[in-house]
Amino acid sequence: MYDDNPTLRGMGDKVVNEALQGQVYGAPEVLDRPAARQFYIESYGCQMNFSDSEIVASILGEAGYGPTRDLEAADLILINTCSIREKAEDTVRKRLRVFDKVKRRRPGTLVGVLGCMAERLKAKFLEEEKLVDLVVGPDAYRDLPNLVAGAEEGDKGVNVFLSREETYADINPLRLQSNGVTAFISIMRGCDNMCSFCVVPYTRGRERSRSAYSIVAEATDLFDRGFREVTLLGQNVDSYKWVNPESAGVLTFAELLRLTAAVHPDLRIRFSTSHPKDITDEVLYAMRDHRNICKYIHLPVQSGNSRILELMNRTYDREWYLRKIDRIYEILPDCAISSDVITGFCTETDEEHRETLSMIDYARYSMSYMFYYSERPGTPAARKLTDDVPLAVKKRRLQEIIDLQTGISHELNQCDIGKTFRVLIEGESKRSAMDWKGRNSQNKMVIFAKTGHHQPGNYVNVRITEATSATLLGELLEA
Ligand code: SAH
Ligand code: SF4
Ligand code: F3S
């Protein structure tokens, strides 16, 4: 299997990046200034966290800190954490053990915990992990230079204040680990959706939307600097709602999509995540009308059974979701849909689990992120429901879902053989310097031999000749 597999990217408990694997892109004034001190940052969890790390890097850059990829050389070690499942938190604690050792060897090195786990555990972190100097929640990053200065004087710093307004709209993120072609733009923060299993509303606070002007300006700036794809990020992008202070008019997500698509026809637009209850026909029409809005929707179902969906407080049932899938394929016949699935949620029976399997079959997901349920302290499910499905059963159901999804992905990818796709080249394939990798509109990774004089950031036509469940292989057609 190829390392370029997009399904291995960006979710929950997987370790996703080692800091700064690629180049760093940022405001020249930040990059040109010689950094007196250096920070190292590692990010875990969802794309929002990766995007936040770029905001943190920009704030620290302004304060005179430069990024390093060398843990041993860092004056400040930061870990941007995730709380979504227990395993995600375990991973963070393991990394803290490693940082502890660095700190012992190099006294004076500061260690800071950022993100969702910082928000969930707050000052408790300092009691549990003695060597942590800073605990900073997702809405308090502007305070980092202050807190770091205090910590340099020996004062441990905690700021986990959650804001109703903060969107970091004015901060130009320092693009860490960037391929120079694709970038994230955070369009909103927080979540008001209270899904009973989920810790995010507690770690990220209330939902708020960022100014459409600043989003379009960021997309334009990225395009001017050579980027060719932006992903608009939020926990629930379809509930984006921005009130223009000048006109008092309300701008919806569908309108924001049209505005960003108009930046340039060669700038691809993606977005994540959509909540099935909020995605409207207007969003689907915007996707249909603009070729540069990618035909791909991540539409997490969580469960295919209506009783479980109700316990999860997802606010839609099986029938409603099925109709949504029909509607998407009706308006966008070539759209790929992907999903998130949780197995073994409280009281789930085998029969109810089979409804999730049949949902996956019906929806023909191109891929899914699949998890077994992990109870999170303080969530409605932890307070009101019993986590009573034995671990072995959760895992068996998860395996059944993974097997089914892998088969469907394989089948769908086989159907792509012979088709020609417009692919945006993202860089060299990890497996071979002779090959390019890029993605088609449907978000499928395509690998093909380098011929001609193409560069990352170019669009090329590729005819698919082979396919696995995760990757399409093809040959470049000279345009
Ligand atoms: N906002 C997104 C999801 C963010 S969390 C949405 O609403 O779809 C990413 C995924 O992690 C969720 O979709 C869910 O499938 C999974 N997840 C969240 N909490 C979980 C838990 N307690 N146990 C297992 N998986 C969980
Ligand atoms: Fe969590 Fe639900 Fe919000 Fe997604 S929509 S972040 S699953 S509460
Ligand atoms: Fe994890 Fe927080 Fe994202 S809990 S999935 S990093 S919003």
Image: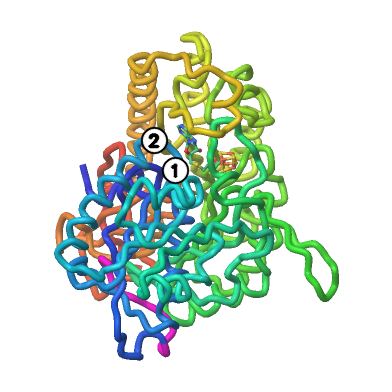
Q: Please indicate whether residue 434 sits to the left or right of residue 212 in the image.
A: left
Q: Please indicate whether residue 403 sits to the left or right of residue 322 in the image.
A: left
Mark 1 CB within 8 Å of ligand 3: yes
Asked whether the viewer can see residue 454, the reply is no
Q: Residue at x 69, y 31 (%)?
A: 315
Asked whether the viewer can see residue 465, the reply is yes
Q: Looking at this view, is 88 or 235 the one in front?
A: 88
When the figure is inspected, residue 380 is found, relative to residue 126, above or below; the finding is: above
Percent x, y of residue 14: 33, 44
Q: Please indicate whether residue 288 sits to the left or right of residue 133 in the image.
A: right
Q: Residue at x 18, y 68 (%)?
A: 106
- State the quadrant of the C terminus: bottom left
Based on the picture, tell me whether residue 22 belongs to the magenta stretch. yes
Q: How many marks?
A: 2
Residue tagged 2: 86
Within 10 Å of the Cα at label 1, are there few (<14), some (14-19), or many (20+) other Cα atoms? many
Percent x, y of residue 387: 48, 19
Q: Secondary structure at mark 1?
A: loop
Query: What is the three-letter code of the residue carrying label 1?
Result: Ser
Query: What is the three-letter code of the residue carrying label 2?
Result: Glu
Residue tagged 1: 83
Percent x, y of residue 211: 68, 69
Q: Which residues are magenta?
A: 20-29
Q: Residue at x 62, y 32 (%)?
A: 326
The image quadrant of residue 215 is: bottom right
The image quadrant of residue 76 is: bottom left
When the figure is inspected, residue 76 is found, relative to residue 467, above or below; the finding is: below
Distance from label 1 to label 2 (Cα)?
7 Å
